[in-house]
Image (cartoon, rainbow, N blue to C red):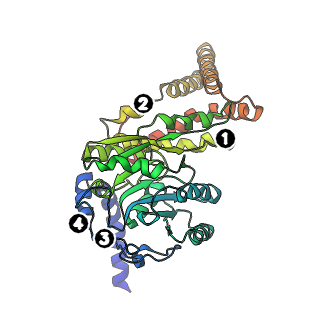
Amino acid sequence: DPAVLRGIAAAARGRPWVFADRRRLPDPVEAARRVLDPAPPRSPAGMGAATGPPVDASGGGQASRSLLGTGAATTLDLFDVSVVVPTYKRDDLLRRCLDALMSQEFPRDRFEIIVVDDGRSASVPRLVGELAGQHPDLRLITLPGLGRGPATARNIGWRAARGEIIAFTDDDAYPADTQWLREGLTPFADARVAVVSGSVRVPTSDPPTDLQRNVKNLESSRFLTCNAFCRRRALEMAGGFDERFTVPFREDSDLQFRLEANTGRLVRAEGARVIHPAPPGRFAVSLRLQRYSQFNALIYKKHRDRYGELNAGPPLHYYAMLGAAAGGVIAMLTGRRVAARMLATLWAGLEVRFFLRRARGTSRRPCHLLDLALTSLLIPPLSVYWRLRGAVRYRVVFG
């Protein structure tokens, strides 16, 4: 059809203009738009394929209740809290997490568990269905994810939830005891509290691997989505998670900064404890993780005034190593052998220093030391590459 062909040609010519001029809505505008969206269906039929028993519209015969004080709940609120767990092809860890959640000493008719299967596997619905059958008094459902990372999966979960409070945890973490939900919800008795962050403990090997030592730093974080509680309306105002963060990195800090900007209060509940074991890590796993660096550019662009809190300043030692290596090659090619030797010595010294710093206090197993030696050579160029790629992708200049 000639008209169709002309339309396709016109659309193709307009694509560069569309991509060059498109812009994301500012966060306050996006939050306001979401508030105007129709509320998500609250009936079981609107919740997707539930693997647990059906729940009647009255909440199992119970009147609508809330921890938030008189008048805070509506007739649509069937639960005080909904626990959202994104998962991706880690059924053994997911089972451990769900077992701990189902052991909570909390009224079974006042909370639900929503598993978002970002791997869209056949095994997760079976696992959740099996556990739901063993606990018919608890609403436990699974929803399919989109395979776009935990930020998108959590948005799917909390927007389908039926609780006044949304609790987040991860499939590779689990509550430390049976009081996690009670401890996390207690601060919400104060109507001014919108966000609560619990404490995280990270067990590691002794001595740990380099990866485990890095994961151990989670213990000092102020807000982590493996142990966080948010009022639903606070999430709606913030617009939920920014789905441009497609890996488990910086999406929690981005949400924290936006929630604090809107609500002004983030309360710690030290009694709400979660265990987040750190795996030893596969060989050279640190190379694959360098791609996360590109999202430093995105969070810098969005929260320039708070970026310094993330301890993610410019990797000057990487720049020095790459500069020495590049300078040495140029000096060699131009016949300046003395300068080339000096720069090569500087590069080698910086590399050895980097290796020793990573190896200090970690495992001395030969395989681990070989991993450190290899990755110490490759991490600097990979990290700088991904930082530059992020700067170009998100159109921001940062160190």
| Mark nearer the N terminus (4 vs 2) | 4
Disc 2 marks a residue whose amino acid type is Gly
Q: Which label is found at residue 122?
A: none
Outermost residue, bottom side: 1
Q: Quadrant of the N terminus?
A: bottom left
| Mark nearer the N terminus (3 vs 4) | 4
State the SS at label 3. Answer: loop
Percent across and percent down for residue 23 are: 29, 55
Distance Cα–Cα, label 4 vs label 2: 38 Å
Per the image, the residue denoted by label 3 is 76
Circle 4 crowding by C-alpha within 10 Å: few under 14, some 14–19, many from 20: few
Distance Cα–Cα, label 1 vs label 3: 45 Å
The answer to whether 29 is drawn above or below residue 275 in the figure is below
**Residue 93 visible (yes or no):** yes
Circle 3 crowding by C-alpha within 10 Å: few under 14, some 14–19, many from 20: some
Q: Which residue is painted at 46% across and 47% down in the image?
A: 227
- Residue 396: quadrant of the picture: top left
Nearest to viewer (mark 2 / mark 3): 3
State the SS at label 2. Answer: loop
Asked whether 197 or 280 is in front, the reply is: 197
Per the image, the residue denoted by label 4 is 36
Distance Cα–Cα, label 1 vs label 2: 26 Å
Q: Which residue is painted at 27% across and 52% down in the image?
A: 27
